[in-house]
Amino acid sequence: MHNTGRAAMGLDPAAHTLIRQLALNGIELETRYEVTARNRRGRVLWVAQAKNRVVTAGLNKVLDAAFKTGLASPAWYVGLCGASITDGAISSGTASLASASNPFVAADATRNIIVRGAGASGADLLTTIATYVSAGNVTLGVNAGTTVSNAPVIWEARAADTMSSHTPWAENSNYTNATRPAWTPGTIAAGSVDNSGSQASFSINTNNTLIGGLFLADNNAVNGTTGTLYGMAPFTSVGFRQLNNGDTLSVTATLTAAST
């Protein structure tokens, strides 16, 4: 998701100058993820991309780093997102998604959403939340192609999301890593920086693990609820991805800045 006025994370002093220059004319910053999954034999299972939804806490962090207190060798980490709820219910030919968990708020309208198995022929339904109806019901942007109940659902982060509160998604910790893997940036050039030289890697340890997206935070504790959440990105082009014990994930996050 493009974020006008939303910023890249993990900035060093070279990036501060770039931000100041771009801010004179307006600035648009974006985080793109590319994720590659492999089985235990190294064969590629799937590749997925996602774009970041930056939350207010992440924006405040960048403003503080670039314009107020600065950051000394900032550290950021990649996390995996799983389903927020597992009781999604929708009927084929309708757009009304219900959940007995009552997870929805008015701010969820316009957010991208994935409903497991509710698309055509049982594929995942990838759409947006068109209208907030109640805490237990929203209207989606398209009709379901398959009737489902007890379906896993994930949707984009809210602006107010933090590491301690993020209802649209849950952290998935089904991997052997002792901590969330680090995002290690390379050289900043032409308004872009990525970690392609040192990808974040996850070793999955549980069969039938569903991954719905990724997030960035400055705390490496698995399932940790402190520190700053920068943002999260659901797989809105491919839906949930399933992994099994022994599979691995390699994640490249590319941060770009452009004058608008």
Image (cartoon, rainbow, N blue to C red):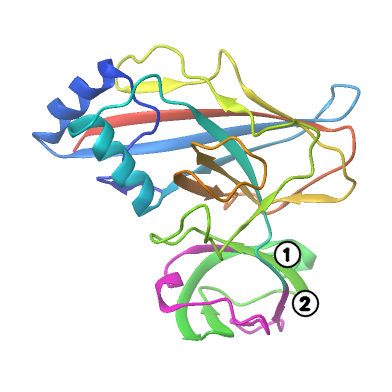
Q: Amino acid at mark 1?
A: Arg
In-image side of 97 versus 231 (left or right): right
- Label 1 residue SS: loop
Q: Which residues are magenta?
A: 87-113
Q: For the point 29% across and 17% down, which residue is it?
A: 190
Of the pair 90 and 59, the residue shown nearer to us: 59
Mark 2, Cα crowd under 10 Å, few <14 / some 14-19 / many 20+, is many
User: Where is residue 131 shown, x and y percent of the image?
Assistant: 45, 80
> How far apart in space, not on screen, are marks 1 and 2 (Cα)?
8 Å
Residue extending farthest bottom = 134
Which image quarter is the C terminus in? top left
Q: Which mark is residue 148?
A: 2
* Relative height, residue 104 to residue 192 (above, below): below
Residue 9 in which image quadrant? top left
In-image side of 155 versus 116 (left or right): left
Q: For the point 75% across and 71% down, which residue is it?
A: 151
The residue identified by callout 1 is: 116
Q: For the point 46% across and 28% down, which residue is it?
A: 254
- Is mark 1 in CB contact (under 8 Å) with mark 2? yes
Q: For the point 53% across and 81% down, which residue is it?
A: 138
How many marks can you see? 2
- Label 2 residue SS: strand
User: Where is residue 33 shown, x and y percent of the image?
Assistant: 54, 35
